[in-house]
Image (cartoon, helix red, strand yellow):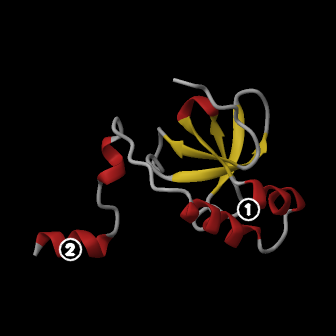
Amino acid sequence: MKAYPFEVGRAVASRQGHDRGRRFLIVGIVDERHVLIADGDTRKLAHPKKKQLKHLRAEPTVAAGTVAAILAKAQTADSDIRKALAAIAPVRQEGCAGADRITSKEEYALVQE
């Protein structure tokens, strides 16, 4: 397994926490153990989440087009992040049982009927 470096613009998937299974882009590096992540939807660039590297799985994709907008903290960077994550093919994580869990109350109600 090839290890990918954690850099600004790298696509990552969360392995731990309530956001397990979700995909984000790295928008900043705090220190050697922590990065700032955002997805442009629930976590905006104005309020990124600080996450430990051991709780993230790096993907081989780097959103090169959005790196300049992220570094400039442009107003349209959130939409660029969403577009970049949508362009990346969805990755199914085999070891993550929570990724397939229904989280929406409406979807849960439909399943119960």
Q: Is residue 40 visible?
A: no
Q: Please state the horizontal and vertical placement of residue 28, each as a whole percent of the image.
A: 78, 46
From the viewer's perspective, is 73 left or right of 98? Answer: right
Q: Is residue 67 visible?
A: yes
Q: Please state the horizontal and vertical placement of residue 24, each as a whole percent of the image.
A: 59, 52
Disc sitting over residue 109 in the figure: 2
Between 78 and 62, the residue placed more toward the observer is 62
Q: Quadrant of residue 94?
A: top left
Q: Residue at x 19, y 75 (%)?
A: 110
From the viewer's perspective, is 113 left or right of 66? Answer: left
Q: Quadrant of residue 31?
A: top right
Q: Residue at x 85, y 59 (%)?
A: 68
The kind of residue tagged 1 is: Leu
Does 105 sit above or below residue 63?
A: below
Q: Is disc 1 surrounded by few (<14), some (14 to 19) or many (20+) residues within 10 Å?
A: many
From the viewer's perspective, is 80 left or right of 109? Answer: right
Disc sitting over residue 14 in the figure: none
Disc 2 element: helix
Does 42 sit above or below residue 62?
A: below
Q: Quadrant of residue 6?
A: top right
Disc sitting over residue 45 in the figure: 1
